[in-house]
Image: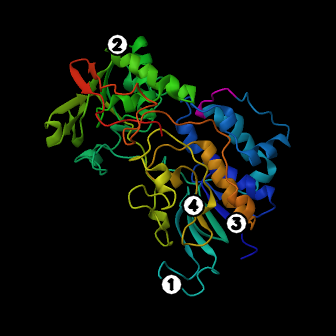
């Protein structure tokens, strides 16, 4: 076991940070990335500007390695796009000789287990090395052994479907290629697909808002472009976020910009609407609501699903995990990030203790560690990586000393807490927000800062 490396699954920002911390401690590491380059998922949203500045987007151990090679930190308060994060940080980090020696791209992990032991086998389990089944782009299968495994594979490759019940809407799976998932670059390479068309954006988070704002920009060049915003909820105050009260200014500005567009009537809004079925309709697509949506239907030439993502747990089926049954994060982490309780991105320091699993020396970190919760920040993942690596190296004092160099990032947008004092004057009654021909009631439950 002492001769085997710690294997990291995923070559995104958090996986690279884990590798950097291991190298800094003189530990053997091997990073397996399914894409043909590190940061492959980041490049998928390379056109999107982040709402956290550089000072929170760079890992400490990675920065020390880079600075030793003459790298200069970008301006701390500048907001990078995904492409800039890759070009100015991830690629230079991966190209360092020490990092390049431990990175294996084009190597997708399909399963993780223990040598000669499935999930049921107890005897000698903790002393048996991990075995990872991998497959390369040309189909070659290999077996990799490890003394510990850190899963930092993220959630970007497992995006949520349109269906409001968590399953694909009826007929959705048969529309392969006709629905875009994630954040397509509607002003760039995919402009021709959306310009002058009737485009439906499904979702109410930051990804959906970014897509809507890009489509409105596209419409300035292609006035025939129509935009339909379909949401499951009609809680617009939650959608808009904290605005000027948001400690991350750019995140607050997203909400303010979409609020202004809504109030100006620049969007056709359909809410609340829960998709039960999707079908081709001539050259376009039509979605149908369930009974609670009045069984109405909405037509669009194109649909962009910005409905979030979830962890791919299939490759971990032979490991012993203790996951929250709803959030799908570790059970200890779930209360801190549960979207039924938190929707404002409050970041609390957490590390190895909250991420520990019954399977000894196996950890899930980064976006995947948050399960289905959407409030992850890179700085959170970097602290996870530092704490977990410290634990794997036996430095328990460092593993337990978890902290985040972040501003207070809570915003008054949750409707699940009980104190409204920080969001509105005491006793203020809910307002009615008129949107086009639809009146959306502001939340009747009290709201509070997280």
Label 3 Cα neighbours within 10 Å, binned few <14 / some 14-19 / many ≥20? many
CA gap, disc 3 and disc 4: 13 Å
In the image, 100 versus 85, the foreground residue is 85
Mark 4: secondary structure? helix
- For this view, does 156 lie left or right of residue 298? right
CA gap, disc 1 and disc 2: 62 Å
Q: Indicate which disc, 3 or 4, sits on the residue closer to the N terminus.
A: 4
- For this view, does 423 lie left or right of residue 17? left
Q: Indicate which disc, 1 or 2, sits on the residue closer to the N terminus.
A: 1
Q: Which residue is mark 4?
A: 355
- For this view, does 228 lie left or right of residue 61? left
Q: Which residue is mark 1?
A: 121
CA gap, disc 2 and disc 4: 45 Å
Residue 233 spot, x, y in % from top left: 29, 36
Q: Which residues are magenta?
A: 77-82
Residue 301's tag is none
Q: Which residue is mark 2?
A: 264
Label 2 Cα neighbours within 10 Å, binned few <14 / some 14-19 / many ≥20? few
In the image, 255 versus 424, the foreground residue is 424
Q: Is residue 40 magenta?
A: no
Mark 3: secondary structure? helix
- Image quadrant holding the N terminus, namely bottom right
Q: Nearer the viewer, mark 1 or mark 2?
A: 2
Does 115 appear above or below 441? below
Residue 392's tag is 3
């Amino acid at each position: 076991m002492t001769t085997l490396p710690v294997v990291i699954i995923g070559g995104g920002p958090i996986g690279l940070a884990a590798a950097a911390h291991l190298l800094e401690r003189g530990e053997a590491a091997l990073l397996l990335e399914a894409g043909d380059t590190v940061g492959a998922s980041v490049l998928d949203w390379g056109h999107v500007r982040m709402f956290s500045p550089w000072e929170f987007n760079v890992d400490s151990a990675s920065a020390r390695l880079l600075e030793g090679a003459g790298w200069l930190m970008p301006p701390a308060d500048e907001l990078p796009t995904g492409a800039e994060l890759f070009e100015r940080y991830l690629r230079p980090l991966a190209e360092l000789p020490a990092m390049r020696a431990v990175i294996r791209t084009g190597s997708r992990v399909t399963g993780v287990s223990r040598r000669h032991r499935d999930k049921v086998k107890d005897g000698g389990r903790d002393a048996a090395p991990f075995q990872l089944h991998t497959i390369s782009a040309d189909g070659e299968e290999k077996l990799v052994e490890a003394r510990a495994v850190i899963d930092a594979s993220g959630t970007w490759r497992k995006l949520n479907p349109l269906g409001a019940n968590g399953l694909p809407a009826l007929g959705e799976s048969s529309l392969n290629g006709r629905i875009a998932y994630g954040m397509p670059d509607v002003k760039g390479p995919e402009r021709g697909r959306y310009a002058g068309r009737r485009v439906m954006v499904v979702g109410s988070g930051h990804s959906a808002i970014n897509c809507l704002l890009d489509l409105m920009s596209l419409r300035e060049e292609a006035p025939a472009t129509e935009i339909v915003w379909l949401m499951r909820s009609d809680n617009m105050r939650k959608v808009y976020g904290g605005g000027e009260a948001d400690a991350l200014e750019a995140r607050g500005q997203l909400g303010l910009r979409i609020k202004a567009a809504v109030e100006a009537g620049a969007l056709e809004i359909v809410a609340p609407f829960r998709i039960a079925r999707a079908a081709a309709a001539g050259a376009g697509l039509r979605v149908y609501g369930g009974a609670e949506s009045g069984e109405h239907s909405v037509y669009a030439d194109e649909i962009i699903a910005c409905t979030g993502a979830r962890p791919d747990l299939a490759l971990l089926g032979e490991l012993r995990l203790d996951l929250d049954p709803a959030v799908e994060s570790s059970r200890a982490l779930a209360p801190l990030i549960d979207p039924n309780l938190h929707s404002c991105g409050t970041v609390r320091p957490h590390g190895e203790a909250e991420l520990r699993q019954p399977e000894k020396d196996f950890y899930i970190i980064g976006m995947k560690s948050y399960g289905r919760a959407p409030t992850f920040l890179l700085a959170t993942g970097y602290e996870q990586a530092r704490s977990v690596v410290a634990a794997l190296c036996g430095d328990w004092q460092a593993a337990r000393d978890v902290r985040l160099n972040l501003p207070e990032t809570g915003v008054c947008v949750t409707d699940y807490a009980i104190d409204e004092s920080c969001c509105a004057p005491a006793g203020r009654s809910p307002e009615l927000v008129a949107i086009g021909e639809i009146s959306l009631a502001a939340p009747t439950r009290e709201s509070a800062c997280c």
